[in-house]
Amino acid sequence: MLASRLVVGGAGFLGRVFDRALRSVDDCLGGGLCRRVVVLASGGLDTAVLLRLLEIYGAGIIVLSINTRSRAPREREALRDMLSVIRGVEAFYEIDARDLMEAVELVGLGYSAVAGREPYYVPARNLVFFGYALYIAEIHGACAILTAHNGDDSQRLPDVSQAFLEDVAKIARYYVPGIKICSPLLPLNKVEVTALGLGIGAPIERSWSCYDNKPAPCGKCKGCIEREYALKKAREIIDSGDRAT
C-alpha cells in the first residue's frame, strides 16, 4: 500500500505532509471501508498528486472529466497521459459540457450578471460537476466523490470549502446513502501538494496547467505562474534535505 519513497510518520517536512494527506484520504474513505471512489479530474498538477495518493492507498478509481467549452484539448490529453501510469483506474468518463462557459465568454455574449467574476469562472461549476459525479457514483456503487482542490483554492473559491462539500454531500445522500464528498488535499497548500507529488512520484511531468492550448505552456497565465512558483519552492524544500527518509 505504501509503495512510496516517503515513510509514513517519518521525520521531516515531506513526512509530515504525507501523513496529513494520507490521513485526509483515510478519513474520506472511512478508514479503508470505502474501496471505490469517483474522482473529478482535470489534467492539472493537483489531480496528478491525488491520483497517485489513491493508487498508494489502494482505492478503486473511477475518473470523471468534464469538458467545458473553453477547456484546452492539451489538458484533456494530459489527463489521459497521467492515467496511463496510474494503477487502480477502473473506468474513465469524459462528459461533453460545451454549453458551460466561462465568465469572459458569457460577458462577451451580453450576460452582464457575471461581469464581476474572475474571467475563468464558470457559474455554479462545482455544483453542476458534482451532479454528474453523483450519477457516475450511483451506477458504479462508489462510496465517495473526490476533487483535487488544495487549501489555497478554498481561500478564494467558496464552492471548494469544507462547508460547501458537506452541504452538497447532505443532498447527495438522498440518492446514495452514506456517500462522502471530499477534497483530500484541502489541508495542504499548493507548495505542499507539489512537494508531496515530487516525493511520492506523482506524474506531475505529464500534467498541464496552462490556460492556453499551445504546444508548450505560455509561462504567463495564472495557471503557469502558480505552477512554476510551486515547483520552484517545492524543489528548494526537497533540495534542502528536509525529507522523510
Image (cartoon, helix red, strand yellow):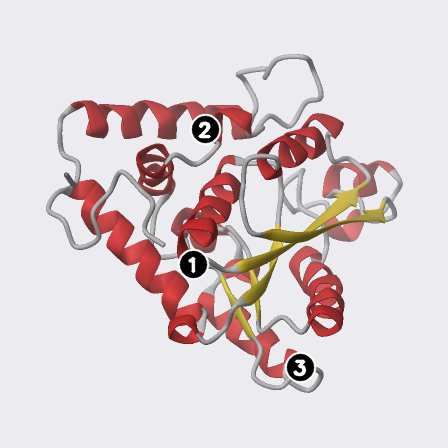
- Which residue shows up at 84% across the image and 36% down it? 108
- Identify the secondary structure beneath mark 2: helix
Q: Residue 206 at what x, y percent from top left? A: 55, 27
Residue receiving disc 1 = 184
Q: Quadrant of the C terminus?
A: top left
First in residue order: circle 2 vs circle 3: 3
The reply to whether dot 1 and dot 3 touch (C-beta < 8 Å) is no
Q: Which residue is mark 2?
A: 227
| Distance between mark 2 and mark 3 Cα atoms | 36 Å
Tag 1: amino acid: Pro
- Locate residue 203, reporting x and y percent: 48, 32
Q: CA distance from mark 1 to mark 2?
A: 19 Å
Q: Residue furthest top?
A: 215
> Label 3 neighbourhood size at 10 Å, few (<14), some (14-19), many (20+)?
many
Where does residue 119 sit, x and y in percent of width and height?
Answer: 67, 38
Q: CA distance from mark 1 to mark 3?
A: 20 Å
